[in-house]
Amino acid sequence: MHIVFFSTSDVFKAEEILNEKNIECKVVPTPVQDKAYCGVCVETQDRQAKTLMGDMEFKVLE
């Protein structure tokens, strides 16, 4: 799954949050269908990741 954010700083904040929780993730280019976002996103297979993003604005692409 891809967790897509509007700002690059939120992408790296999310990566830090997930790393602190030992959730495997990586920063990758945003899928083509959502180029309105910042250009990079977080990719992970852990469904719990969505619940850790707090009040950040994001979209999940399966």
Image (cartoon, rainbow, N blue to C red):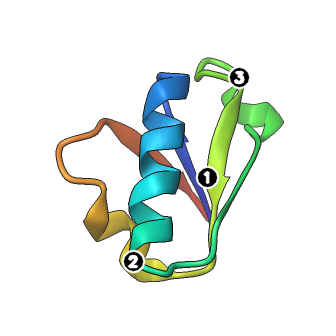
Q: What amino acid is labelled 1 in the image?
A: Val
Residue identifier under label 1: 42
Q: Secondary structure at mark 1?
A: strand
Front label number (2 vs 1): 2
The amino acid sitting under disc 2 is Lys
Question: What residue is pinned by disc 3?
Answer: 35
Q: Specify the quadrant of the image occupied by residue 39.
A: top right
Choose the circle earlier in sequence order: 1 or 3.
3
Screen quadrant of the N terminus: bottom right
Left/right placement of residue 51 relative to residue 48 reads left
The disc labelled 3 sits on which kind of residue?
A: Lys
Of the numbered discs 2 and 1, the one sitting upstream in the chain is 2
Residue 52 position, x and y percent, is 28, 65
For label 2, the residue is 21
Q: Nearer the viewer, mark 2 or mark 3?
A: 2
Whichever of labels 2 and 3 marks the residue nearer the N terminus, that label is 2
Label 2 sits on a secondary structure element that is: loop
Name which residue lies at 52% across and 79% down: 23
Residue furthest to the front in view is 20
